[in-house]
Structure formats: C-alpha cells, structure tokens
Image (cartoon, rainbow, N blue to C red):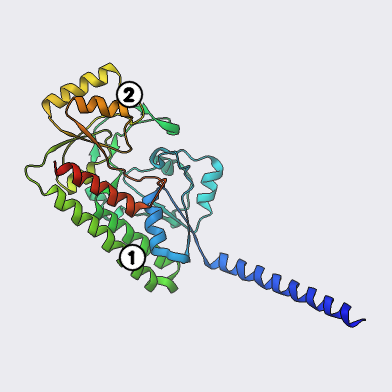
Amino acid sequence: MKRSSFIVLFYCLFLLLFSLLYFWSSVADAKVRPTVYVVNYPLMYFAQRIAGDHAQVVLPVPEDVDPAFWKPDAAAVERFQHADLILLNGAGYAKWVSRASLPRRKLVDTSAAFHDRYIATEGGATHSHGREGEHSHAGTAFTTWLDFTQAAEQAKSIRDALSRLTPEHKDEFAANYRALESDLLDLDARLSAISSRRPAPPIIASHPVYQYMARRYALDLKSVMWEPDAMPNDAEWKNFVELHQRYPADLMLWEAAPAPDIAERLRKLGVQSTVFNPCGNRPENGDFMSIMNANIEYLQRNFAH
C-alpha cells in the first residue's frame, strides 16, 4: 500500500472513531440528563433556574394558548408519559391532567404543601377566548404563584423533586433554589410595600385570576370577565357602570394591554388601565422575573397617583 493511501485510510478511521465517540458521549449525556415536563411557564422558569444544565425542561403548550385551559392531543399526552418528571401546578390547574393516564410516580403537585390555603371561586359564566375554547373559572383559584411566598414554596418542591431524581446534583439545586427564593421574596417585599397604603384603594380586575395576590397583599379587588381584545357589549358596559357606582375603583388590572378603544372608554369613566401579566405562558420578551418586576412597576406608578 502506498504511503499516501495509508495516510488517507488512517485519517478516515480516525474520523470514524471520533464520530462514534462523540455519538456515544451524546447518548450517555442524554441518558443522565432527565426530561422534565411542566404544565405552565412559571414552573418551567423555576425548574430551569434550579436545574441549570442538569435537566431538559419542556412546556409543550403553544405560545398563544393559556396553559390553564389547554387540551393536549394524544401525542402530547404520550410525551408527558415518557418524561422523567412531570411538574403540576395543582389547585385545579390544567384540568386535562385528571383525565389523562399519567404515571403517578412521576407526578409532583408543586402546590401540595399549601393545599389547605387554596381559594374556592364562585361559579362563573362559561366564556371563550383565543384557541382555548369555552371554559369557566369556577372551582378553585389556580394562579397560585401570584402570591410570591407560595411561588417560593412551589419552587422548593421542584428543588426536592429534582434532588430525588438526580441526587448527585442536589447541592447545586439547593444553591440555585436559594438564589431563586431570594428573587421571589424580593418581589414579595416590593408588592407588600406598595399595598401597605391604607386604606387600600379599590381595584377592578378584567379577569378572576388575581385572588392569591389580592389575599397576600391585602388588595381590595373585584373582578369582571372581560377580554383585552374584545369590546364588551352594551349589557357588559351597563353592568360595569353599576359595579363602578357601588365600587368606585380608579384602576383596572388587565392580563394584557386592552384595546385602545376599551381603555379610552374606561378613562372617560375615570378608570385607568394597567397590565399585571400573570405570565402563565412564555412571554414574547423577557422572562418570569422581568415580567413580574414590570408588573410591580406599573402598579407602583398607578398607586402613586
């Protein structure tokens, strides 16, 4: 064999060996890096902060759908079933979970530690918005993370679940959790300081999703059932005016910015609109912490008036 041919053969064998080693190292890494499926974005954010590079965290809900009312198809349910860990919000969130066959040993209800503090909600009219279809908010209030002390408890349950799954990383999970907890309790302190104004000014919410926030931060809040991109009909405006006469709020909270014509009509009634995004799904920009900081800044600005 000519020397040049030997060199080419040796080079090819070297490339083949290198490719096989890279492939097997990737396979090994995939085996030790567990997959964690979650039902909403707050849990995704908490899990990513705590797990770092030691888990793949997946939220399969489309970005334009409210995860609380998402209805997964069979393929999506199967992906949940094959995850190493499934993080649930609890409090009746993602009702599809109760109807799906998911491995119980993989399920973690992140709000179980405070299930005795769930808030029951009154029966409400069925309504529809976006791709979620018809639904109601009757049963149990489920935006548990808007009380940031409860959010810290949910994050703690994620830390514990990850530590059971991969105990070799528990010290790193603990350190990451402490940093996250500090951030969440900072949000709690900031919102507590804003709401310490007495007497608390009345607030109207466009949707019944702020119950835990109202309880924790002593907000005087009433809710309607409006969508930011749908002009209320005459009957809804009439009901709102009657509510406003009994409950003279000058501030209305929205999950997203209301259409300009809705905001203008509210202004004529003496009601200023402000966004407090619950962040149930992935935001277009920023992350959970930046959205919550912006929420608090908006609220602080309005409370100052």
The residue sitting at 38% across, 41% down in the picture is 68
Percent coordinates x, y for residue 1 in the rendering: 93, 81
Amino acid type at circle 1 is: Tyr
Percent coordinates x, y for residue 187 in the rendering: 24, 55
Q: Is residue 239 above or below residue 275?
A: above
Instruction: From the viewer's perspective, tell me whether residue 88 is left or right of residue 182.
Output: right
The residue sitting at 21% across, 55% down in the picture is 188
User: Which numbered disc, 1 or 2, marks the residue that appears first in the sequence?
Assistant: 1
The residue sitting at 31% across, 56% down in the picture is 154
Single out the residue that lies furthest toward the right.
1
Determine the secondary structure under disc 1. helix
Instruction: From the viewer's perspective, tell me whether residue 72 is left or right of residue 46.
Output: right
Q: Is residue 200 visible?
A: yes
The residue sitting at 30% across, 25% down in the picture is 261
Q: In the rendered picture of this protein, how many numbered marks are placed on residues?
A: 2
Percent coordinates x, y for residue 185 in the rendering: 23, 59
Label 2 belongs to which residue?
231
Determine the secondary structure under disc 2. loop
